[in-house]
Amino acid sequence: MSVFATLVGQLAELLQPLFHASAAAAAIVLFTALVRLLVHPLSRAAARGQRARAALQPRIAELRKKYRKDPDKLQKAVLELHAEEKVSPLSGCLPSLLQLPAFFLLYRLFSGATIGGDTNGLLTHRLFAAPLGGRWADLLVGGQVFGAAGLVYIGLFAVVAVVATFNYLRTKRTTADGGLVAVADGEQVPGLGAINKVMPFMSFFTLVTVAVVPLAAALYVVTSSAWSAVERAVLYR
């Protein structure tokens, strides 16, 4: 983790002339963008995978009809179809999973008072009036929600709300077009109805994450969420 701290510190030094006291916050945004650039090829592959899975839906519907009374054979046949067409049902999860280590590193980096036995100097950095190691939940307890630091979080919540609303409308449109619904004999696959109802609201859970994690990790989440919204709009258009 000390290597990671050094990387963030060096990025902050490079950005100091432009962002001054908020240089470390800018470094986190830049670091997030670099992570997303590294993961982008997998995101493109995931988009291709989703289109390929959508193309397989008519054949999967036929398999469901054929093996209606034999779930084991149906599962085996669907897996064989994916293998035959070289389509991974889990490919869409990889970009998100590969970002988790970076998020948890930031979380730990700005949660501990020391790094390698030394004082954690990164905790002195701020985004405007809000310390990068602070949490909105702490401001809520202290009654400072509408103070100078609280306004920083209100700005982040506003960005998250805009991104979440964009994702909500896009997901609603996708489900309305049948993009996430698989049917067989005119009947929706059991369980997908509930998933389709919940999916449009998933982006709003980011608000909870931003409220409870250190501001540095919240910046990573907000930047990554905004990147994902733009990326998916381009790749899945």
Image (spheres, rainbow, N blue to C red):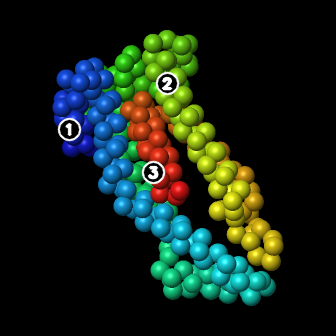
Q: Which residue in the protein does label 3 denote?
A: 231
Residue at 60% over, 70% down: 54
Distance of label 3 from label 1 (alpha carbons): 29 Å
Q: Is residue 28 above or below residue 133?
A: below
Residue located 28% across and 29% down the image? 24
Please name the amino acid that badge 2 sits on.
Answer: Gly
Task: Give above or below for 132 relative to 77.
Answer: above
Determine which residue is flagged by label 2.
Answer: 155
Q: Is residue 55 left or right of 36 when viewed as pictured? A: right
162 with respect to 95 (left or right): right
Graded by Cα atoms within 10 Å as few (under 14), some (14 to 19) or many (20 or more), the crowding at tag 3 reads some
Q: Are marks 1 and 2 in contact (CB under 8 Å)?
A: no
Disc 2 packing (10 Å; few <14; some 14–19; many ≥20) = few
Residue 21 can be seen, yes or no:
yes
For label 3, the SS is helix
Of circles 3 and 1, the one toward us is 3
| Cα–Cα gap, marks 1 and 2 | 28 Å
Q: Residue 224: percent from the left, percent from the top? A: 43, 43
- Residue identified by numbered label 1: 6
Instruction: Check the image and report above or below for 183 versus 96.
Output: below
